[in-house]
Amino acid sequence: MNQDLWKTRHPGVPREWELLGEGGNAIVWKEGARAIKRLKGSASREARERFRRECLLMSELKDRADLKIVPVIEVRQREGADEIVMTALDGNLEDVIEHFQCQPIKAAAALVGVVDTLAKLSAGEPRVHHRDLKPSNLLYRTTEMDLYVGDFGCAYLAGSDRITPDWRALGAWAYRPPEYSGGRVENVDEKGDVFSLGKLLWSMINGNPNVTFPGPVWFLPEYDLTLIWPEGLRTAEAMYIIAKCCSIRPEARLSLEHLKVMLDNLASDNDLLDTSLGANALKREQELEIAYAQRQATARPFVLRLIADLEQALNQLHAANPDSPRLQAWLNEWNRIANRSDSLVDQVVVNESDAPIMNVHRRQEMLFTRFYPEGMSGGPLRFYASLGPMHQQHRSPQLTVESRDAGAVAVVELLSDIPETANYTSKTIIDFLSRAIDTL
């Protein structure tokens, strides 16, 4: 075929087609009343597989009149590439988001159909979860109140082979649920889409393009819609729904069906269901949940590092002096409890309880090691070790390692009254034990 028919940089694309939009892996063109989504020639292998799945899914859903998805005319292969041919709509939510500013009732009414569609897809066979909800993926026809879900390129289909690499984070970062930021999620369910919908509701009522609150921290004063728009009708109820959608814990979020009911009640100017906790109580609950998640994020590597360094110290000390009964007793005890790493992490990090590591009594002498969680005695998460006579009135040599924002800090107290403070290294524990033995 005559190559002059095609756009210079886009082989296979007729010159008369207009550019509608471009993403990382696909371009959307306009031909009259139709929009054509076509994969880029430079798309990766993973992107090609995702587009193939999107084509199959759209082909299956195109006759579902009960779903508010962008109307699909056909799925085809043309000039060497797969294409999804859709009805061209009039724009996306990002273009008209100001129309919802300070109007919770209007925003809820516009989202009800979207949530109903996602609920039906989530409950179908196979289950489908969108995973990339954002303003640019909600399109409208004629009016901003008539929203349709588009771009199923990141959608999850239950029962299909997984193609997301373990390290890949899916979805637009601003609307991405926290659990999607760490790479592949093993058990995908509706709660990720619920989180994104909560952020969409907030963004619509806030009414400023390209603005949403970071992560799950809706509860900070600068993101409180009741403070941003104090004159707005029912912003407190809207904030309650947002709070129930955007919990950092997926299991604490609403279901899609429950969200649909709450939005429908808000849109109909009815009383919301299940408001007994109140937005203020949820705000405090979310603050505690995020603080807990932050403690977990820093505590787990700290605990695992100290356990590994303690094991290394015991093995190196014994290797240097294999005939020492003391060092043999220590190593024997460690080998007896060596598989307790996971339980120690759970006790310190998850349950936030102090946890003994290994305590060795030998001939009136004791090696004592323990973790203390953050907050116990008002201090940070810390590792503690001491070595000395069991019944000595004076203090024994002791080591305290504290987890701090700038890195772990070690404090060594031998028999002098002057503690030694230094940055913690992998040699700190073995150096302390060697020096403590010399004091016995």
Image (cartoon, rainbow, N blue to C red):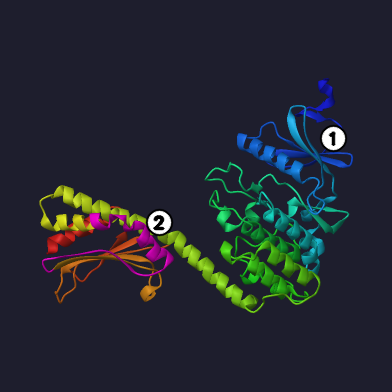
Relative placement, left or right, of 107 versus 142 is: left
Outermost residue toward the front in this view: 125
The C terminus lies in which quarter of the figure? Answer: bottom left
Splitting the image into 4 quarters, where does residue 134 fall? Answer: bottom right
The disc label shown at residue 301, or none: 2
Q: Position of residue 56 (x, y in %)?
A: 71, 40
Splitting the image into 4 quarters, where does residue 55 fall? Answer: top right
Q: Toward the viewer: 303 or 267? A: 267
75 over 196 or under it: above or below? above
Outermost residue toward the top in this view: 1
User: Which residue is rendered at x = 82% and y = 53% of the image?
Assistant: 140
Pointer 2: residues within 10 angstroms few (<14), some, or many (20+)? few
**Can the viewer see residue 415 in this picture?**
no
User: Which residue is rendered at x = 43% and y = 65% of the image?
Assistant: 350
Q: Position of residue 309 (x, y in %)?
A: 29, 54
Q: Position of residue 235 (x, y in %)?
A: 73, 73
The disc label shown at residue 8, or none: none
Q: Which residues are magenta?
A: 335-364
Residue at the disc numbered 1: 17
The N terminus lies in which quarter of the figure? Answer: top right
Q: Is residue 268 magenta?
A: no
Q: Earlier in the sequence, mark 1 or mark 2?
A: 1
Where disc 1 sits, the SS reads loop
Mark 1 residue type = Trp
